[in-house]
Amino acid sequence: MLRVLALVAMLATTAVAEPELSLEIQEKAVVAKVRGLTKREPVELRELHAESRKPISATSVRGFAESGPVAIAFVINGAEYYLGGTGPSGDELVQDDELLKPLAVAFDRLELGTALPPGSEALLVSYSTGAEIKKPWKPASELAGADLGSAKDYKGKLGADLVAGVGLALGELKTRAAKHKLLIVIGDGNATNDEAARSQLQALATEAADVTFAALVVKSPLSPETALIDVINNLTPWVTTSSLVGVEAALEHTVQSMTEQFEATFELAHFVPDGKSHGYSLVHHDEELDSAMLTVPLAPPKPAPSNAWRWLVLAGVVAAFSLVSLLVFRKRD
């Protein structure tokens, strides 16, 4: 599901992420994906309500940084009222850099080259009326505050087409081969059409199973009071709300939280292939991290024993008999 925007309650607090477990079958293995925790080892799966069955130990555990380069897309509200420093009527109500400046400083100090694995890439998308690529894919270590541009770049940008921004970023992420794909929305929680955004974001969710989402909610002095509330139920645990003063720490926290995930692999042969849904808890040193459901399809029926060999033997006997008969008749002649 699209764990993207709980662009919710504009409180200056940080959401605490609970561990989130998902189980899926990949070839001849069951892969447990854990979000919200750094790598734990060893881990095992225990079937719920089946104490008589032995726990299944992981054959391998891989941390976030061990999965190779990351593709990360930042989707930023590029409306004039947000980063251009101008109110809807055109009156200069705030200084041009009142939000843009601290946000640029936050990007300068983010140090994605250290936070993400080597070879990671970053993209910057802005949304207002429609969406545009503000900065194409580049090494994540090179993304800087200067890539946001200046306040004049946002003059005349009206609207807040949040859905267009998310959609454009998702399309770009599809072009990357990275195992981990991250998308962070930075905005004030508003969309041009809040009601339409709800259903449209849910539609995008079905196409984004391989993307990890987060939202950094920061209200500018000119942000409307309304905001999307509960855009999608049970969205990303990585939702941070911040004041202008705390935006730097908030952005760093958001990225760090998204990298707190790992995968554990288990042999499929240890699971019951009965086509029924079973609950499993992921355990680390008797500490239950989280639980999830898994259905292992019914094992295909064994093919019926073939009688082909019998026909081959019979054909051989007939051929041998024919040959012997032919030789006997020739000898008589």
Image: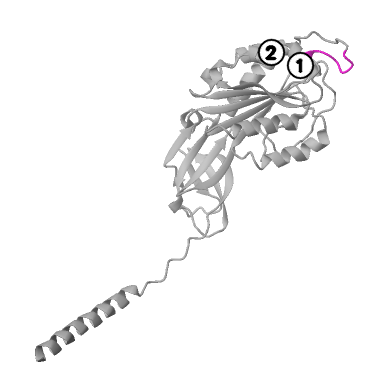
Residue shown at 62%/19% (left/top)?
Answer: 252
Residue 89 lies, in percent from the top left, at 89, 16
Q: Position of residue 130 (x, y in %)?
A: 76, 28
| Residue 142 shown left or right of residue 102 in the figure | left
Q: Which mark is residue 154?
A: 1
Outermost residue, front side: 333
* Direction right: furthest residue: 89
What residue is shown with label 2?
149
Q: Is residue 224 left or right of residue 41?
A: right
Please, is residue 264 above or below residue 185 in the view?
below
Q: In the figure, residue 80 lies in which quadrant?
A: top right
Question: For the residue carrying disc 2, how many other residues have a C-alpha within 10 Å: few (<14), some (14-19), or many (20+)?
Answer: some
Residue at image x 37%, y 72%?
306
| Observer able to see residue 41 | no
Quadrant containing the C terminus is bottom left
Residue nearest the observer in this picture, 182 or 207: 207
- The numbered disc on residue 17 is none
Give the magenta part as a residue range. 84-90
